[in-house]
Image (spheres, rainbow, N blue to C red):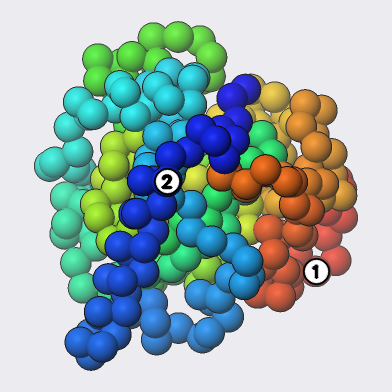
Amino acid sequence: MLIRRPPDIPASEITGESLYQNRRAWLSTAGVTLAGLALPARARAWGGDDKLTPYDVVTTYNNYDEFGTGKDEPAKHAGGLKTKPWMVTVEGDVKKKGSIYLDDLLKGIPLVDRTYRMRCVEAWSMVIPWNGIMLGDLIRKLEPGTKAKYVEFTTLLDPKQMPGQESGVLGWPYVEALRIDEAMHPLALLTTGVYGKPLPNQNGAPIRLTVPWKYGFKGGKSIVRIRFLETQPRTTWNIAAPQEYGFLGNVNPNVSHPRWTQKEERRLGEFFKRPTLMFNGYADQVGQLYTGLDLKANF
Ligand code: MTE
């Protein structure tokens, strides 16, 4: 696996970060309120030495196996994916069922602007300024029934547009899921943008799941189906390697992975490794979701 070290990242890549910071400063002086800024400070706070990962790194070092397994392949091959118009099908124990254009699905839901630490099971991490909606806002709008205990997210299945689906590296389509109480947590997002720009295809356009206290594999990309289920669904990586990828996928430095240490991580663009934090540093906010659960058995 390739890890980009500081000398590989040209100074020009830093520009994306400073431009974005300036844009944020401009927005606040102009009196524009982003919905995300109205959230409790904790929800958007991140550690003092966590610098934003440059835009060019966020959008060229990706995992999106539908476009190839190399980190640089999604950026090279995902450009042709047609993301407009985009239909999403809502199924299961939910009132507002059916297929709906993405714009209509999201209509009326406030946009939020959140910077999150993101930790991949492969022991690299980034700090990414996402734009999107709170998943809980969408779930409330869809009105799930009382039997809905899990929410499942399915990626587009279209081998013509997604050549990686011709290969057997994973079972397709890519499926991920959350317990409904996790999905309702205010940190869980469906993202449609990054750095204030529309989400590039390689990052999961037009809409992807973003759950910062879980490993990156939980964040299914280019979602076409949302199902509300009574029983826990099977998920792609859990089927592929159940001993390596649990259903919960919570970042946990105390549960080792057979191939990568989970005790520490390399922040892309940094040389020295840093310790990995419980729930990726969001324990204060999400710890109560798992009270009483054996997190070694339920990884
Ligand atoms: N979603 C789909 N459909 N296919 C994938 O291969 N990879 C996952 C996740 N979502 C993946 C996916 C993994 S392993 C990670 S780490 C994140 O996407 C990476 O997201 P990023 O490329 O935007 O950083």
- Of the residues shown, which amino acid type is indicated by label 2? Ala
Q: In the figure, residue 287 lies in which quadrant?
A: bottom right
Q: Earlier in the sequence, mark 2 or mark 1?
A: 2
Q: Looking at the image, which residue is at 24% across and 52% down?
A: 198
Under circle 2, the secondary element is helix
Question: 164 or 125: nearer the eye?
Answer: 125
Circle 1 crowding by C-alpha within 10 Å: few under 14, some 14–19, many from 20: few
Provide residue 197's location: percent of width, then percent of height: 25, 55
Q: CA distance from mark 2 to mark 1?
A: 44 Å
The residue wearing badge 2 is 11
Visible residue check, residue 173: no
Depth check: give the residue in front, 20 or 251: 20
User: Could you say where residue 271 lies in the image, as x and y percent from the top left?
Assistant: 67, 43
Residue type beneath disc 1: Thr
Residue positioned 46% across, 34% down in the render: 62
Which residue is denoted by mark 1 in the rendering? Answer: 291
Q: Residues within 10 Å of mark 2 (few under 14, many from 20)?
A: few
- What is the number of callouts on the image? 2
